[in-house]
Amino acid sequence: MNLIDEIKRLAHAQRDEVIEWRRWMHRHPELSQEEYGTMEFVAERLRSFGLEPRTGIGRTGCMAMLEGGESKSQKVKESKSQKAGGRRYTVALRADYDALPITECTGLPFASENPGVMHACGHDMHTCSLLGAAKILCQLRDRLAGDVMFIFEPSEEKYPGGARMMMEDGLFDEVLPDEIYAFHCLPEMDCGRVGMRKGRYMASTDELYWTVKGRGGHGATPHLSVDPIVVASHIVIALQQVVSRNAAPMMPTVLTVGKIQEQGGRTNIIPDTVKMEGIIRTFDPEWRLEAHERIRRISTGVAEAMGAECDLFIDYGYPAVINDEACTQQVHDNACAYLGEENVEWLDLRMTSEDFSFYQQRIPSCYFRIGIHEPGTPFSNLHRANLIVDERSLELANGLIAYNAMMALEKRIKNEE
């Protein structure tokens, strides 16, 4: 039996088990930096595969190493998998497992039992797919041409991001992987399909927090006040030129003010203060910093011109996701071999963001997509209370993840020969 057929057989054999894992996670979602139960659930599964997980990395993260190629028949291959420094080649696979503060309305029999919290971004699917891949790779460890690092990351949805937290807590102190891979489910794509993009793929993201300070008073005597609501409104309008007139036409940029809240006003009361929150997303690091400065100057300048003050705090967030071309081509070729070329596609840019980009700053990598939409059913988007995952995607995902990891290690050896 060839490798693809063997992996598909193993993935199919554990299909029901992986689905049950995912349904347990879906019933028991936990918010960012609170994923203690999820961490223990993952660690327990890893131990059952014969691995020795480390928990508590970045507070609630989990990691395990699989040493491959230990059978006598693999000794020659094992020696080839050594680097000049004596360490074996290592491929890392990452999944995230935090949930969102959303009240679920799917009506599923395994819907969230944690009020106001839901796996509305598919992280339960990511985690259980990686667990499935880990089980497959443990069963095939004698055929591995190197080692595999499994990273289960908390707090992807919340700054400073689980990737950064785990790395700062020593995730790579002993072993820095040679390559790292992750995927995200994609509701726009039908189950059975996979997509990826070389180079720039997802935007950087920074959060913006404004405090506009005026002078409150009676709504009937506005001439005796400085109305921060009017000032804030002018700031919002003026900021549109950052995208329409300052960003180069070929540089995708999104600037959104998503929340405006007055502090103490009502129908006949002009408040003293208005707070606003928003995001700026783009791809180029130099333009990113320039956009920050333009936002700051516009915000403070408009406020000053209208007799008010504006304080702006910019929470510097995740870098852009930029896929390594060789790693991405490898995922593409492996997906074509595993699924058929007709089920693999190249993707467009996305203005969403991901803290996987922190890993990418240190390690060649690819972040790709796996479809979860059941054909013929209504579309439900990420971060929505009605998100539905076609559970057939788990079998596809855990098999493809395992196959790609094995082929990545094989390619490393061939490149050294």
Image (tube, rainbow, N blue to C red):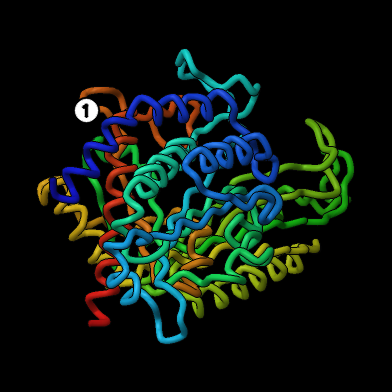
At a point 34% along the width and 37% down the height, the residue shown is 187
**Horizontal and vertical percent position of residue 361:** 49, 73
Say which of 42 and 26 sits in front.
Answer: 42
At a point 67% along the width and 62% down the height, the residue shown is 315
Task: Name the image quarter holding residue 303.
Answer: bottom right
> How packed is label 1: few (under 14 Cα within 10 Å), some, or many (20 or more)?
few
Residue assigned mark 1: 375
Say which of 284 and 228 sits in front.
Answer: 284
Tally of marks = 1
Q: Please say whether residue 353 is visible from this viewpoint.
A: no
Say which of 343 and 132 sits in front.
Answer: 132
Vertical arrangement, residue 239 with respect to residue 372, above or below: below
Left or right: residue 46 versus residue 130 is: right
Q: Quadrant of the N terminus?
A: top left
Secondary-structure class at tag 1: loop
Residue positioned most to the front? 72
Vertical arrangement, residue 183 with respect to residue 84, above or below: above
At a point 83% along the width and 43% down the height, the residue shown is 271
Residue positioned most to the bottom? 84
Q: Please say whether residue 87 is visible from this viewpoint.
A: yes
Vertical arrangement, residue 188 with respect to residue 199, above or below: above
Tell me the amino acid under the disc marked 1: Pro
At a point 58% along the width and 59% down the height, the residue shown is 163
**Horizontal and vertical percent position of residue 221:** 85, 43
**Horizontal and vertical percent position of residue 348:** 28, 57
Left or right: residue 206 versus residue 136 is: right
Q: Quadrant of the C terminus?
A: bottom left
Left or right: residue 376 versus residue 363 is: left
**Horizontal and vertical percent position of residue 305:** 73, 68
